[in-house]
Amino acid sequence: MRCVSDRYAVVGNPVGHSKSPRIHALFAAQTGQALSYDTMLVEPGNFASAAAGFRNQGGRGLNITVPFKEDAWGWVDVRTERAQRAGAVNTIVFHRDGASLGDNTDGVGLVTDLVRNHGVRIRGRRILVLGAGGAVRGVLQPLMAQEPAQLVLANRTAARALKLAQDFRVLGEIQGGGFQDIAGLRFDLIVNGTSAGLQGSVPPLGDDVLAVGGVCYDMVYGDQPTAFVRWGRAHNAAKALDGLGMLVEQAAESFHLWRGVRPDTAPVIETLRQG
């Protein structure tokens, strides 16, 4: 008798490069869960029909990557509080009755990688977050929940950072501005949430912006050290980290939402590092 496994997928465009199928296959093997996980290439404008079709064919959950996180936010029946505030959904749970729950696990993935995997202290520290797009919006609530002494958003377009800071000010003191506004300030942790690294560049930062013993974290990752990781090393960061751990940790949070089991992420991160 054939074992029928639950179906999951990641939706995006492009999506062929995604490491998510491999990550969830490793999680499933580790935890003894029977499931399949595929990629779904969807054309812009077709998210709703693709998600509904997957659900109607018995799919149990979806991960959402660019450019559909905002589409998913608008499509789901119910959103968690963290997804509501993030304005984006990266995980959908389909209940047996067909209802859909949208969550955002990006921020908890970032914080878990920093705090648990790398021993980085956020509470009471001065945090600089570079960028003001969807990637940054998705991580602000979990960062603020760690109670940093200061959180500053810096973006090429200052107005976007100011608006984002205003949107999240109910969670605590968040400041926003342009890169020129952080001149003379020093930070214990700098998180790069811009897409500059994908083009091999780094936002314009002063040489003294990173405090002694400070940490740099790039939310993107690559087979080689990213431009921001290289910048951190050149500026004597105590740790200069890329976002591979964040990717695995946000996936683990999704897996837990779907399966009720929390996988051990350390061996999965190590496997991915090895190629």
Image (cartoon, helix red, strand yellow):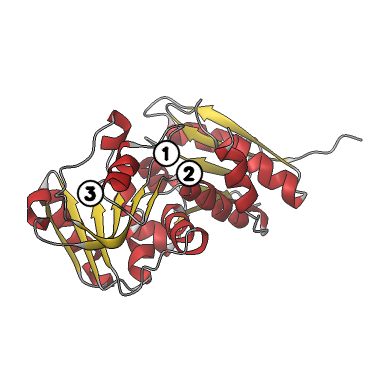
Tag of residue 244? 2
Q: Where's residue 128, x and y in %? A: 24, 58
Q: Label 2 near label 1: C-beta < 8 Å?
A: yes
- Residue 65, image quadrant: top left
Disc nearer the start of the sequence (2/3): 3
Disc nearer the start of the sequence (1/2): 1
Residue at image location 32% in from the left, 54% down from the top: 237
Q: Where's residue 222, x and y in %? A: 43, 34
Q: Secondary structure at mark 1?
A: loop
Quadrant containing the N terminus is top right
Query: Is residue 157 shown left or right of residue 136?
Result: left
Q: Is residue 134 in view from this perspective?
A: no
Q: Where's residue 172, x and y in %? A: 25, 73
Query: Is residue 20 shown left or right of residue 137?
Result: right
Amino acid carrying mark 2 in the image: Leu
Q: Is residue 63 in view from this perspective?
A: yes
In whole angstroms, how far apart are the C-alphas of marks 2 and 3? 21 Å
Query: Is residue 185 shown left or right of residue 274?
Result: left
Residue behind mark 1: 221
Crowding near pointer 2: few (<14 within 10 Å), some, many (20+)? Answer: many
Amino acid carrying mark 1 in the image: Tyr
Closer to us: mark 3 or mark 1?
A: 1
In the image, 176 versus 197, the foreground residue is: 197
Closer to us: mark 2 or mark 3?
A: 2
Tag of residue 154? none
Query: Is residue 227 shown left or right of residue 160?
Result: right
Q: Where's residue 195, x and y in %? A: 29, 37
Q: Secondary structure at mark 3?
A: loop
Amino acid carrying mark 3 in the image: Ala
Residue at image location 55% in from the left, 39% down from the top: 273
In whole angstroms, how far apart are the C-alphas of marks 3 and 1? 19 Å
Tag of residue 132? 3
